[in-house]
Amino acid sequence: LPSPVTANWGEAIDVSTFYGRAEELATLKQWILGTQTRQPCRLVAMLGMGGIGKTSLSVKLAQEIVEGVGGTESPHHAFEFVIWRSLRNAPLVEDILADLIRVLSNEQETEADLSKDLSSRITRLIHYLRTHRCLLVLDNAETILRGGDYAGYYREGYEGYGDLLRRVGEVTHQSCLVITSREKPREFVSLEGDTLPVRSLSLIGLRVSDGQEILRAKGEFIGSEAELEALTDRYAGNPLALKIVATTIQDLFDGSIAEFLAQGTAVFDDIRTLLDQQFSRLSDLEREIMHWLAIDREPAAFSDLQEDLLVPVTKTQLIEAIGSLRRRSLIEKATVTGGDRQSNSYTQQPVVMEYVTERLVEQTCQEILTGKLSLFITHALLKASTKDYIRESQIRIILEPTIAQLLSTLRTKPDVEQKLNQVLEKLQELADQSGYGGGNLINLYRQLKTDLTDYDFAQIKVQHAYLPDVNLHRVDFTDADLAKSVFAQTLGSILSVAFSPDGTLLATSDEDGEIRVWQVTDGRQLYTCREHTEWVWSITFSPDGETIASSSKDQTVRLWDSATGQCFQDLQGHTGWVWSSAFSPDGQTLISGSEDQTVKLWNIHSGDCLNTFEGHLGGVWSVAFSPDGQRFASGGVDQTVRLWEVKTGKCLLLEGHTNRIRSIVFSPDGQLLVTAGDDQSMRFWQVSTGKCLHVAPHDSRIWSVAFSPDGEWVAIASDDQTIKLWEVRTRQFFRTFQGHSSRVWSVAFSPDSQTLASGSDDQTIRLWEVHSGQCLRSFQGHNNWIWAVAFSPDGNSLVSGGEDRAVRLWDLQTEKCFKELRGHTGRIWSAAFSPNGQILASGSDDQTIKLWQVKTGRCRATLRGHTRQVRLIAFSPEGQLLASASGDRTVKLWEVSTGECLKTLRGHASWLFSVAFSPDGKRLVTGSDDQTVRLWDVNTGECLTVLEGHSKIVLSVAFSPDGKTVASSSDDQTIRLWDADTGECIHTISQEAGWVQVVAFSPSIESPILASSGNDQMIKLWEMGQTECLKQLQGHGKAVNAIAFSPNGQFLVSGSEDETIKLWQVNTGECLKTLRAKRPYEGMNITGTTGLTAAQRATLRALGAVEF
């Protein structure tokens, strides 16, 4: 029996009603499947005018090949994969290749695994086309081709499709790529031939009999065979044209074909001619609907259309207009899966959508050029709060062509900006009558990359402006309506996400100790809860949705009213960080797991601790109640899972994990327990027996596991920056969700199992469509916690780096940032000057090190090789080497002049956090998550000794100026001094106030001072060998993550989570200067604005906005 075909249909349309094309189907199958005498084709094009039926034919063809309908007696193997994709929204070729490779690799290769190089991606695709028999269909290829005098040439930025077609057509493989297009890509000219494996088929119109079938489906018509034939001929057998004129014949000529033909309508030569005629006959409301459907780019619900209309109409009027457009065959009812909009959603055929989009762009440009605004006010060219992938399409298909046309007419960017400024003046005159104009204008400014500093949008409606990545310094929005506009959020790393039981709310928590609650439908932030003083590791809703429980590093569990955001219960009793909490199914009790190695059971009404369960030999990271409430599970540092009976405290021990367990979840029916953690595996356990049923390997640490409420899926979030979906029934991996740029801390399913939420270290929250893998919405955070500071060798300038991915150079004299270096795609963990001050190095979450020329700010090299974040970098004393410590458990030594990796040092069992050279450059010291400090020989790469004594993560290491002592700081709240030669711990300094993030020695060999900082918001200065603190430098408002001494030792610089950099005089402890980078909305005036919630206003103020 043939193997089943893996079919992936993308946005393929419903072709259950299909007319004619039997000959074309037979020909195409012969080409694609091959015959006894002819090899199958590798590349096929279906060509024809718009509306001729290319899309329907391509879907029908693929379906019949999958089903084995009417195929030739081909000696060749059946297809293993059939993938259909639309290019209607002009995706980049790199994205299409990544998508195809993802499906063909059964989700084993995703965007993160692929080279950015186009040629390499095509090579990888061809690998799969050789090893599997694949049918790939790319519909609507004309959208990637350039309009103009010459056919077959590509739009700017889409030339890579030509490389794809050429290589697929030239290279030997066993698969076939089919494209549909209105014009032939030029690669076919040299590749195709009657006996060659590259062919093209030009579609002509339908036969008269098939045309009659279309007319019968539209209703009753009066006409002879000859008149039917004449009608079909006049419209060249074009199916869409026949559907459109059928409505005209019925509405205006009572179904009489003869009367219609007697009008002598011009000869039909292109579908656009007919669409021009039809558009001229539409009512104003019908035109509005057509424009909105083109903007939406996907099926739109009736309620969405109703909400979009600027001038409200009655439900009856809208129903009548939609009905009229359907009768005209200009819109059609959509077939949408995975949602509740199937019966009430509407869209347009590709040729109609393209036609309307072009009209939209042309009219928008004309209105901007003339200053006569109409459509510019009544329609949003971009919908800020729509799904992410739709918004990206609106940018490509609407905004980019609009800017391109304006530049073509006005020639220069300043001239376009001047014209847009005139539109702004017009909108200021219209004020609250400006409709969608303000949002459209700002989105065009954004696309043009205009500096909006000091722009005035006071009293204007600014709806659907997309502004998370735009600086709006001193922009005036006084009395403006900002409804439906999207701004950046003050998000840190998102540690936990949870849906409310009814799916309307999403709660998130972060490392700033804040809990935010969002409206799922539009992404609006409703409120923020701020009473925790440390990271909030876990949040969960009660079964009735009325309460949110949060667990924090501050050793408390808090209960919040989900309607108001008010805290009504503070559960205290744990003596360590509280990692996790879970409600009982009846919502009356709560369990919490803590670093203090216990699980506590609480009464949520009284706040009393009902029981404490002891047995774990390390911190308890995760807890979960069984669906029947009789048992709960816990897991953590001791690598065990424990199943407890709530009433008796009896415990069943499940063993098998080889490292700490981070997450535990029961299946909805309570029969399975899924656990995952640092051993890079997920385990399925049978609850009744405690037996491990399956071990699913992963390639990195897993932080979070979630079961879908329907019991079909398990999702995992991990260090590899992805969410992965597994099918429970088969225990097979199914899909990868990709888009985060750092580790993913948490994942949760919506109650209907259709949506996934994820929270990441990259300061974003993402909502994903489960059935398609598409990102529906992302909430982009912004903060600028400082993680790196360093003095230049001359002591006159500073470098800083942090959460906002920028490396900044500061002049200490002027206190100004004089260079901002961008290029990293993740937070900056470390930055350092070379000893001669000419080169600057930075290490990032994006797994790279960049070398910058200090004088010019140019990036001279990007060093790649680490497979996890680069936590710290250090130059050797002579400046020839650079050492980097990474989350991939390695240290790498790089040659600065060439960027070559000379050595990789391995030995640590977990992440590295710190690295430092000895003053003579012969040794390295490193600190790790494995709780050890290691000394290495630089020349040989050999580990000289392992220093043990810390009981938690070693966060920082430093050599004393004479090289005889090593200092280390840890999460265990201690600083240790070690003899660098013997490895003996010679001194321990204990701190009660929290972990010690960083240590640094002053450069004085005679009397060095040790500085330390951490989450107690202070910098402490210590004399060598003394347990009493010499001086405390106070002034920061949050944890201090980075410190460094000046070359002369007289000054110290510090960087903090309060987003400031402070310069201190060492001998007096006085703070001399405070530096702060501009926030994105610094000085933005939001006085009197409407359309914002109180939480949104607070967020904007935190990002620099002001109110008077």
Image (cartoon, grey):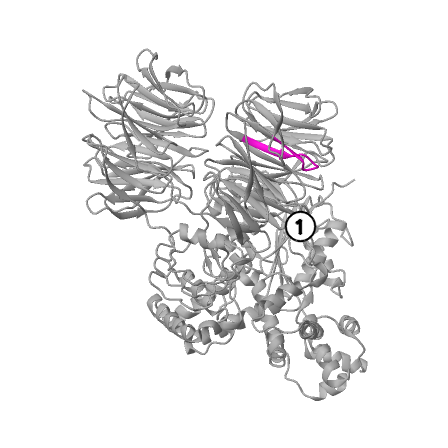
> In this rendering, does residue 699 appear at all?
no
Q: Position of residue 319 (x, y in %)?
A: 69, 72
Query: What quarter of the picture does the N terminus occupy?
Result: top right
Quadrant of res 512: top left
Query: Magenta stretch: dominant SS?
Result: strand
Quadrant of res 610: top right
Q: Position of residue 863 (x, y in %)?
A: 37, 36
Which residue lies most toward the front here? 606
**Label 1 environment density (alpha carbons within 10 Å; few <14, some 14–19, many ≥20):** many
Determine whether the residue tagged by mark 1 lies in a helix, strand or loop. loop
Name the one closer to the observer, 237 or 579: 579
Quick check: 476 left or right of 318?
Answer: left
Identified by mark 1, the residue type is: Pro
Residue visible at 53% across and 69% down in the picture: 379
Query: What quarter of the picture does the C terminus occupy?
Result: bottom left
Name the one closer to the observer, 95 or 281: 281
Quick check: 408 left or right of 724?
Answer: left
Name the one closer to the observer, 711 or 1022: 1022
Residue corresponding to mark 1: 40
- Residue range (magenta): 579-591
Q: Is residue 986 above or below residue 994?
A: above
Q: Position of residue 126 (x, y in %)?
A: 57, 44
